[in-house]
Amino acid sequence: AQSVAQPEDQVNVAEGNPLTVKCTYSVSGNPYLFWYVQYPNRGLQFLLKYITGDNLVKGSYGFEAEFNKSQTSFHLKKPSALVSDSALYFCAVRDNWNDYKLSFGAGTTVTVRA
Amino acid sequence: DSGVTQTPKHLITATGQRVTLRCSPRSGDLSVYWYQQSLDQGLQFLIQYYNGEERAKGNILERFSAQQFPDLHSELNLSSLELGDSALYFCASSVDGQGYYNEQFFGPGTRLTVL
């Protein structure tokens, strides 16, 4: 079975400060990891993914994520947060044991204050 | 705009009724996924279709069913509705059904309210 944990329900940062949203995962095979963002009353938008290769993945809107196999983590980061980054962020995982399901974490609400 | 369309945006109905939610995937995408998002359950995978065939099932109730048509649009049918079925239902599409690494593109969702 596969699962994702986002240990923080909420993250609050000041604009211009670094932003980190944490994610840990559990899979049986090799993980395929994704980050999505959801703005109010909108669908989820894809930010970035890790499949293989470089552990540091760069994505949309200045976001990046670092894959750490030993810690089974895939934390989302942004060097300088913007007020417009305030949203709900989801980490998701699927593994290569022929499982088509994408398992999502519970989500982390990010609030960036001006 | 992801390119995935869903209709209707909002649906209000009564317990015991049946509704149909419709999804059109992005042009070229063969896979369609359905998800349910609620406050208590979070985002739950329901079912996936690939090129007209059911590919994977998640936490989908027996009262719910789905299908994907030859033009690749999909419908999610919810019957004998209960208050607890009130949720946001998302459709997503991706290029293929066997590549675990392809990101999914989500539609804007259908908000279902069961009274």
Image (cartoon, coloured by chain):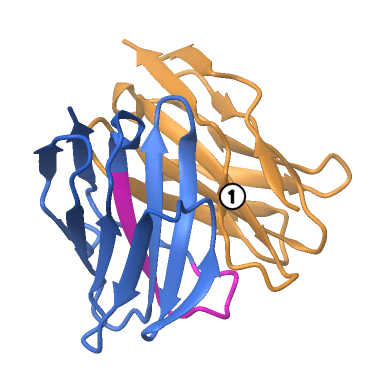
Figure colour of chain A: orange
Q: Depth check: B96 or B115 in front?
A: B115
Would residue B97 be found to the left or right of residue A30 on screen? left
What residue lies at 53% left-to-right and 64% top-to-bottom?
B57
Q: Depth check: B97 or B55 in front?
A: B55
What residue lies at 60% left-to-right and 19% top-to-bottom?
A8
Q: Could you say where residue A9 lies in the image, as x and y percent from the top left?
A: 54, 18
Residue farthest toward the bottom in the current orientation of the protein: B70
Task: Name the image quarter holding the C terminus of chain A.
Answer: top left
Going by the numbered disc 1, the residue's amino acid type is Ser
What residue lies at 47% left-to-right and 53% top-to-bottom?
B60
Whether A79 is drawn above or below A10: the answer is: below
Mark 1 lies on residue: A103
Whether A42 is drawn above or below A47: the answer is: above
* Residue A83, quarter of picture: top left
Whether B28 is drawn above or below A5: the answer is: below
Q: Is residue B2 visible?
A: yes
Marks counted in the figure total 1
> On what subunit does the disc labeled 1 rest?
A
Taking the magenta stretch, the answer to whether it contains residue B93 is yes
Q: Could you say where residue B93 lies in the image, as x and y percent from the top left?
A: 36, 68
Q: Which residues are magenta?
A: B89-102
